Amino acid sequence: MNVFESKIICKTFQGLENVLAEELQALNARNIEIIKRAVVCDYDAELLYRCNVELRTCLKVLVPVYEFMSESTDDLYNFASRLKWEDYFDVKQSFAIDFTIQSEYFKHSQFAALRLKDAICDHFRKLYDERPSVNTEAPDVLFNLHIHRDKVTISLDSSGTSLHQRGNRMAQNIAPINEVLAAGLVLLSKWDRQSHFVDAMCGSGTILMEAASYAINKAPNLERSYFCFKNWKNYDAALYRKVCKAAEARITEFDYKIIGTDSSKKSIFIAEKNIQKAGLSDWIEVREISIQKMIPPMGRGTLIINPPYGERMQIEELDRLYKQIGDAFKQHFTGYTCGVITSNFEAAKNIGLKPTRKFPVMNGKLDCLFYIYDIYEGSKRKPKTESTDHDA
């Protein structure tokens, strides 16, 4: 069945679906539906371009083109070889296939993708006595093969490379946070952009850059040049330019401070380089200082940190670090909303404060919690009787 121009599927990390749905609502998307690790809405060409350029918590934007039932790779090949692939790209263009398969009928995922590739190539060979080339690095057209049980969905991937690749990062520390997750944390914190923002364990600066682009309302992929939709037959260059021009016009001023600190000289050096490359140096200040000694700007603000989870630290050392984080919150961050993401729920208890909110999120393959603490005058350690599972 041909389902082209019916739906848009915006993929994200588990735990960020509601935030992504709110972003789509702001873009006036219609018939929004939240599913696992994705949000679905009605297809519209202008919306498709805006999703790629403007969404902060989206990894990929897919457009389903074919759906059918299949229980074997031979059946998949036979059905796919009859589909009208020439509607979507030319034999002179390159293509690739990404895949996600959860099915007892297709136990070898790569072989299923290979059979789809063969079906596409053989279809073109029958039509033109020539086959398109495969380019896995930067294809002109990228297809996504999704199989759940016996339901096969083939989509056009409008993004190409993942949208978290903003093109800002020149260098990185060990285990850097993904840009989409960093943006998700900023949005989950409900920072209103009318107060200061701090990352006191800034690493390579990813959270700072996502906060700054949000603060000035700069679309995260406004300056990105590679999108697969630009190679589609129905690509509207004038409409895309209109989308980019409108996004650029929405960039605004920001009158508060965005500050990043870290105890590592190397991290500060890397962060400065990345921030400069992103063109955000006018809004972000970074300096070498530990969270224990960092004094934030007076007044209201939001802090978000991504501390070590313990993979390279002793338990006693990690517990001491999280206690120092809690002490810093209580001593220096009155009036701030403080967010901490971690997969080490035991270590987080040493922060010694009761979180106002908790959000389950994924950082790579790690199950994490994003703890939100509203620090008010006289914040105290919670009584032990209030302790609950996963509480910090």
Image (cartoon, rainbow, N blue to C red):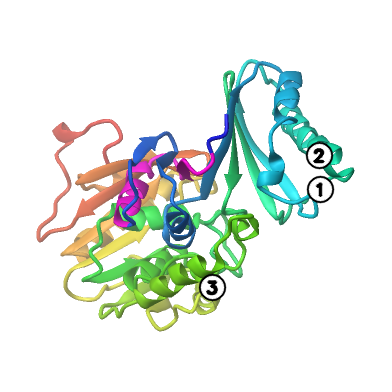
Q: Which residue is mark 3?
A: 274
The residue carrying mark 1 is 132
- Mark 2 to mark 3 CA distance (whole Å): 41 Å
Q: Are marks 2 and 1 in contact (CB under 8 Å)?
A: yes
Rendered location of residue 213, percent (x, y): 39, 70
Residue 346 in sight from this viewpoint: no
Q: Quadrant of residue 154?
A: top right
Q: Quadrant of residue 140?
A: bottom right
Question: What is the C-alpha distance between the residues marked 2 and 1?
Answer: 6 Å
At mark 2, the secondary structure is helix
Residue 312, x across and y down, in percent? 54, 48
Residue 130, horizontal then vertical, whole percent: 88, 45
Of pointers 2 and 3, the one earlier in the residue sequence: 2
| Mark 2 or mark 1: whose residue is earlier in sequence | 2
Q: Is residue 237 left or right of residue 323?
A: right
Q: Label 3: how many residues lie within 10 Å, few (<14), some (14-19) or many (20+)?
A: many
Q: Which residues are magenta?
A: 4-26
Residue corresponding to mark 2:
121
Q: Residue at x 66, y 45 (%)?
A: 87
Name which of mark 3 and mark 1 comes first in the sequence.
Answer: 1
Q: Which of these two is toward me, 66 or 247? A: 66
